[in-house]
Amino acid sequence: MVTTKLLFRLFDAAYMQRWNDQIRPVELTELDKQAHKMIVAYVLGKHEEQSSGFDWAALIESGLFEYLQRLVLTDLKPQVFYKIKEDPVRYHRLNDWVYSELEQLIAPLGEGFCGRFRAYFSEVDEPVHKRVVKAAHFFATKWEFDIIRRANPLGYEMERISARLESQQEQYYDLAGLRDLELYPKLRSFVDLCGLLRFQLRWSHVHRIPKTSVLGHMLIVAMIAYLFSLEIGACERRRFNNYFTGLFHDLPEALTRDIISPVKHSVKGLDSLIKTYEREEMQEKVFPLIPISWHSDLKLFTEDEFRSVVHVDGTPLYCNSDDISERFNSDTYNPRDGELLKAIDDLAAYMEAQLAHKNGISAPELSRARGSIKRKYGSVIIAGIDFGELYTAL
């Protein structure tokens, strides 16, 4: 079972500043970096999904395990971390300590999850899904470093950091997707476009602590969606669709900006007009950047993203999450829990407002949002997840 303590802990990465020993023209947080990393992992994974032994569920969990590890190792500089990693005995001890710090939070997720978490950091081999996530890590880090370097081209350690990142990334050039990101400007532009969502703040008209970006919010929704999917016993494809719909559901906002709900609903028909415009913009500016074979995935993730759907003989059938659990919980039907994702999207917004309140921000907009969202889900159960009970605990 997913606990509220774990949900709040997931937001800790929003406080964690990256490159805070360098001149930074913009704020860079760990939450945003991890979100960008998993988008890059999707791009690399699409190139490798036909490879022997490739496993999307393992890729998603690789990202989640590394995220949780990073929450604990918040103050450890990369140079120190990689030095420890070179010594298997010390690295094992470090991860034992990480697990001891997280055990109370993740134990309710079950022995299977905890076992996979511990095994991930003790693996000697690097299966393809793990190599994809590692490569995505270095790519997203270098993406940030390129911003830092433009602001301080002659700064201390710039050359050394650049050489280290290049060396680390070169270890993964056997991955076709990494080579394609270097060779094909369109694919690189897709990753860059997603990265720009780091700089679009949610609740931009309200002062909040911590600030969260659209990109960071997308990862929070994705991780919670995956954890809830495990809790309800979702099939593998359902977990995949729920996670990546969460990770990409606000991608159109890279083209339209984050439009808050009161504005969307202030004029009758404005919400549907915005959705139509988003689809047109996606069709014109985003889909041409990626291979045609990926279009069906991205449409599922970004269009009607909050409607539950299954596919029967290739035809979409809209239903609800309870129907999916009872009748369509099989990879054959390519299911996606849209209504569950909508509830998680609202849950993430509530927690953003709640955290700001706990940190001393008393903006009336945040109080209204907390109240309206909590009332909305007071007695709602979706796919067995009791949101009323969850909000009571929050």
Image (cartoon, helix red, strand yellow):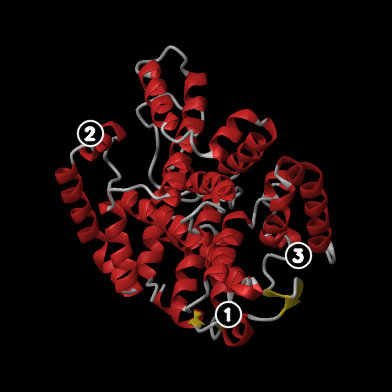
Give the Cα separation between the discs numbered 2 and 1: 45 Å
Q: Sequence-wise, which precedes: disc 2 or disc 1?
A: 2
Task: Tell me if label 3 and label 2 are in contact, CB under 8 Å.
Answer: no
Residue at 58% x, 80% y is 329
Q: Sequence-wise, which precedes: disc 3 or disc 1?
A: 3
Using the image, tell me which numbered label, if any, was put on residue 97.
Answer: none
Residue type, label 2 = Lys
Residue at 35% x, 16% y is 156
* Residue 393 located left or right of residue 191: left
* Of 245 and 339, the residue lying toward us: 245
Tag nearer the camera, 2 or 1: 1
- Percent position (x, y) of residue 167? 39, 26
* Residue 358 located left or right of residue 234: left
Residue 336 visible? The answer is yes
Give the Cα separation between the discs numbered 3 and 1: 34 Å
- Disc 1 designates what residue? 329
Using the image, tell me which numbered label, if any, was put on residue 83.
Answer: 2
